[in-house]
Each structure stands twice: as C-alpha cells, then as structure tokens.
Amino acid sequence: MINKRTSIEEAIAKIGDGAVVMVGGFGVPGTPFTLIEELVRQNPRRLTIIKNDANEAGMGVDHLLRNGQVERLVVSHIGLNPHAIQLKNEGRIEVEFCPQGILAERIRAAGAGLAGFLTDIAMETLLAEGKPRVELDGEEYLVERALEADFALIHAHAADPFGNLTYAASARNFSPLMAMAADTVIVEAENMVALGGIAPEAVHTPGPFVDHVVELQELSEAYGVVRR
Amino acid sequence: MLSGADERMVRRAAREVRAGMTVNLGIGYPTLVVDYLEPGLPVCMHSENGISGQGPALPFEQADRNLIDAGGAYVSTLPGTAFFDSAVSFALVRGGRLDLSMLGALQVAANGDLANWIIPGKYTPGVGGGIELAQKACRVVVLCTHLDKRGQSKIVAQCDLPLTAPACVDRVYTDMAVIDVTDTGMVLREIAAGLSVDEVIAATAAPLLIDENELATF
C-alpha cells in the first residue's frame, strides 16, 4: 500500500481560489486547526466552507473569516461565533443553514455516490424554501441534494501512511462523512503509526478515501480545553 | 443559580426521565435536568455530536479536550458509552430510537407547534439539531420560563415566530405550570405552589382546559 505522507505546504497548496472545502469538527474536537492555519497562510480566496459550525471567535474557521477568504458557509449553526453572525448580518458572507442531521446525511450521500435523498425533516420551516418536493406513495417529501466538496480537511487521532484513520471520542462527528465526500482528502494526524499499527477492525476511515496524510509535529493551544 | 421557581420546574421535569430511556437534553434548562435525576437511574443520555451513554459534566481540570457534548460542555464516559459519527447520531433520532427530547422554547402554540431557533433579524444562530429533535423524538417536552423577557406569554394560541416543527410538543414545563398538549387543546395539569389558577390563566396567551379536581401543585 502506497505512502500518502505529504508536507503540509504541498497538501494545502492544492486548494485554489473558489474551492469548496469541508472542514471536520464539532466545536474544538475534530477541528483541523493546523491545516486551517496553513490555509490562512497560503491565502486562497472566495472559499466555500462546509462545517458543522464556525468554531468560536478567534479560533479555527474564524481565522479564515477574519482573513476575508470565505464567500459562503454551509453550517448547522454559528451561535458560538458572534463574529460570523456579524459578517452574515452585514451581508459580507453568505450562510446556508441545514438541520444538523440533514447536513451530515447530505455529506454522507455525496460520499456514497448518491444524488440526494427524500426527507420530511424541516418541511414546514423556513429551511424548506426553494427545495424541490416530490410525492412518494401518497406522502410529500423534500428532496435534499448530496453535498460534495473539492477538498476535505480532517483531524485524525491516528493515521497510518496509507491513510487508515481513527478519531478520538467526540472528535469523530462529521470527519468520517467528509472524508468520503471530497475529491481530495487531506488529513492531519496527531499520531503516525506504521502500516498495521491500527487493527483492521478499529479503523474508522479506511485508507482508500484518503489522499494526503500530514503528521502533526506538535499540538497548538487551539487543541486544548477551552475555559469559557 | 436557579431561582426557587425555576428549580422546582427543573426538578419536576426530571420526573419525565424513566429507567431504560434514551434521552437528549437540549441547551438551557433541559441541560440542568441531569442534576435532578435519581442517582443510579439507568438512562442513556444522547448527544448530537455522537455520544450515547454520556457521563456527567467535568470541571476544566479533569476535562478531556476531545470529549464535549453538543452544548460545548466537557463531559465524561460511563461503562457502556459509545461514540459515533453525526450521520449515525441523527439516524438514532430520526429512526425512532430517541425516547425523550427535552427542549427550550421561544413560543409553544396550543396545538404543540414549537418555535425555538430564530427571531428574524435579531437572533439567527442557526438551528443545529433542533428540528430533528423536535420532529422525530418519540416524546417531546419543553422547559421554559412561562413569560419572555418582555413579560409576554411563551404559551400562545399560534406562534408568530418561524416554526422549528409543527405539532411536536407533548408537554410544557414552566416556572408556573405543567401543561399537556392534547387533541382538544392545552390542558393545565399542575400549577406552581403559591400561584392561583387565575394567575396562571392570566399569564397564558392560549386557552387552557382545566379540571379543578385533578389539578396538582409542584
């Protein structure tokens, strides 16, 4: 099995202006802070960011917002980041809200090679506006489109050189789904292990989904416990 | 710190939680319910970010940086805890495996409509998992103050705020009352100690059905 280890500069350099980028994580756990930092440094513009949330002010995705790199966010909520809410209210970024499980399922559908799915979730809410409706066996459903991306940025607890991954505790969240749904999947790994270092039945994301593995040399403060 | 009335509301609502249930506690008052459960009650707490069997919250000194609940609190594991991805987490909710969802509210209507995620132009954080929790949990109960900050009833004939989900609420616990949503309308079941029925009616902007003989206090 091939070795997918890549330098962080080389991996992130693939992301150009206008790219659609999925970012794993729910709050701090699972957010690939180091990959995001490099994305800020390399500074591609007009990005669409797909993430559960916009982190908190001054953390993670908020650095991309502050650097003016983001045109559009697709999220389930941004309530912990007043700065993101402000940018939205000022019309400086476009925000698409999805119910959290529908966001997850749209990403999963793309990763599974499906065009979309039918659901009754949110049918009688503002979030149904503009979505196609179909009738099936006498019931009406919304059509939810699959959500795919050019890139996924993923934080793994452990990776082997082929890209088999494990996630820690609640840091799993959207990461295994996003790792299936993007053309190019870039992983930052807290722990690099040899091939065979992750037991086959313990693998959360199988290597064939992964393109580049970056070994983290150290964990910045961003990964730590947040004392609110 | 909770006021006396709020504390009684949360304590009363905690009796919703029965042995064997899988339960999701939303942000706000619902989160506090866990502190009022009978010690050792065998319940399975679900968190949207991919946890079943979630353990108690931890102080920062003991926190695992990778283990938070959906509200961002650092939590713990128990024997029997499981972690999974966000698609699995909401499959559990939509698939009918969540016995009880406890949610906060901006407004609850007489027919059980719930509005709790947006005040257009003022409060637009996004919905998170709220729609699925309201629409698909087997039982949905709301915990909220009876009145909003302007003194307006949160219990209304019809919601004027955008809905989270239609006709989804089974019961409402407030600092003033316990109210069931039934096919024939809202039924006042219990009132807070020290209040009169007339005071509760006056504070409620929806019609209440009342059987004085059945009415309890909490």
Image (cartoon, coloured by chain):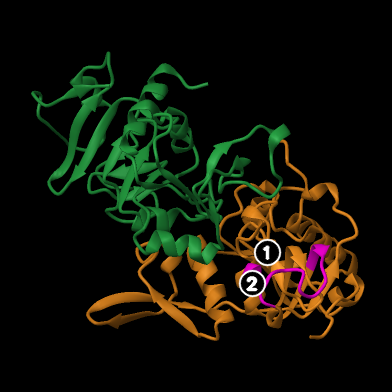
Chain colours: A orange, B green
Answer above or below: position of A114 versus A103.
below
Picture disc at residue A48: none
Tell me, yes or no, whether the two marked residues, 1 and 2, touch with CB atoms within 8 Å.
Answer: yes
Residue that mark 2 sits on = A178
Q: For the C terminus of chain A, which image quadrant?
A: top right
**Measuring 83% from the left and 60% from the top, which residue is drawn there?**
A34
Would you say residue A201 sits in the magenta stretch?
yes
Looking at the rendered structure, the secondary structure element under dot 2 is helix
> In the image, A148: left or right of A66?
left
Looking at the image, tell me whether mark 1 or mark 2 is earlier in sequence order.
1
* Magenta stretch bounds: A188-206
The answer to whether residue B160 shows anywhere in this view is: no
When asked about the image quadrant of residue B182, the answer is top left
Q: CA distance from mark 1 to mark 2?
A: 7 Å
When asked about the image quadrant of residue A137, the answer is bottom left
Name the kind of residue labelled 1 in the image: Gly
**Measuring 85% from the left and 53% from the top, which residue is drawn there?**
A219
Mark 2 belongs to which subunit?
Answer: A
> In the image, A158: left or right of B54?
right
Using the rendered image, report if marks 1 and 2 lie on a common chain. yes
- Residue nearest the observer in this picture, A51 or A8: A8
**Measuring 41% from the left and 32% from the top, which residue is drawn there?**
B148
Query: How far from the left and from the top, in percent, is residue B73?
Result: 61, 40
Name the kind of residue labelled 2 in the image: Met
When asked about the image quadrant of residue B71, the answer is top right
Answer above or below: position of A199 versus A210.
above
Residue that mark 1 sits on = A24
- Residue nearest the observer in this picture, A129 or B181: B181
> In the image, B1: left or right of A187?
left
